[in-house]
Amino acid sequence: MGRGFNIYANLSNFDKHADVSDYIMDQYGANMNFILPISEDNTVSYGVGYQRTDLHIGSNASENLKLFERKHGEDFHNAVFNAGWSYNTLDRARFPTEGYVNSIGAMVSLPLTHDSQSFYKTGYSGRYLKPLFKGYILTLHAEADYGDGILKSDDLPFYENYYAG
C-alpha cells in the first residue's frame, strides 16, 4: 500500500497576451492519495483533496468569460475526490519493451461554498508495446476523457475544459 501527499499552487496570468482572453487564475490545493495493489497486475487508487480557485476576469475578456463571472463569481472552494484502477503487464517499469497498461479513473469536485462549481471527469488511458525486430518496438497509445457539470452546474467550468491538438 502506498500513500502520497500533494500541495500545489498554479498561478496563471493571461491578461498580457494579445492572443488569449484577458483573465488571471490562481489555484491552490492539497490532496492525499492511496494506492492499493490488489494483485500482481491490478492496482486501485483513491484520494481526497481541497482546491481553491481565484479568478480575476479582465475588461478585455471574451463574452463567455464575462458571462461565467456574472453567473458564478470569481472565488471557488471545492472538495475533490478521485478513484482509479490500473492493469499493468509491462515487462519492466523503466524502458519497457513488451506488455500493456490500461487505466481508468474518475474525479468528482463538490462545492464547499454556495457559488462554487460542481463537476466530474472520467478518463481512460491505454498503452500497448510489442517488440518488432532489432531493437524496434511498436507502441500504441490511446486516451479518452469526458467531463460534465453536476448538481447546480450545467457544464464544466471553462478552466476545466478539454482541448484537442
Image (cartoon, rainbow, N blue to C red):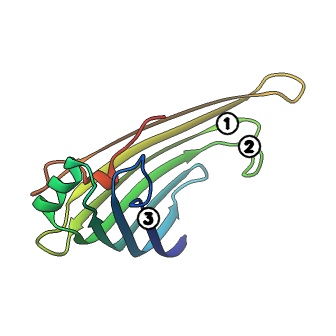
- Dot placed on the residue nearer the N-terminal end, 1 or 3: 3
Neighbourhood count class around disc 3 (C-alpha, 10 Å): few under 14, some 14–19, many 20 upward: few
Residue in the foreground of this view, choosing between 98 and 28: 28
Kindly identify the amino acid type of the residue bearing the numbered disc 1. Answer: Gly
Q: Earlier in the sequence, mark 1 or mark 2?
A: 2
Of residues 11 and 28, the one nearer the viewer is 11
Secondary element at image label 2: loop
Contact? badges 2 and 3 (CB < 8 Å): no
Lower position in the chain sequence, tag 2 or tag 3? 3
**Residue to which mark 1 is pinned:** 99
Q: What residue is drawn where x is 50% and y is 74%?
A: 6
- Disc number lying in front (1 or 3): 3
Q: Is residue 100 above or below residue 42?
A: above
Image coordinates of residue 89 in percent, x first then y, are 64, 42
Task: Kindly state the secondary structure of the residue where label 1 is placed.
Answer: strand
Residue holding disc 2: 91
19 sits left or right of 121 in the view: right
**Which residue sits at x=28%, y=59%?**
108
Give left or right: position of 118 versus 108. Answer: left
| Helix, strand or loop at mark 3 | strand
**In which quadrant of the rendered view does residue 162 lie?**
top left
In this picture, is 24 found above or below 98?
A: below
Q: Circle 3 sits on which residue?
A: 12
- Figure quadrant of the N terminus: bottom right
- Are the residues tagged 1 and 2 within 8 Å (C-beta)? yes
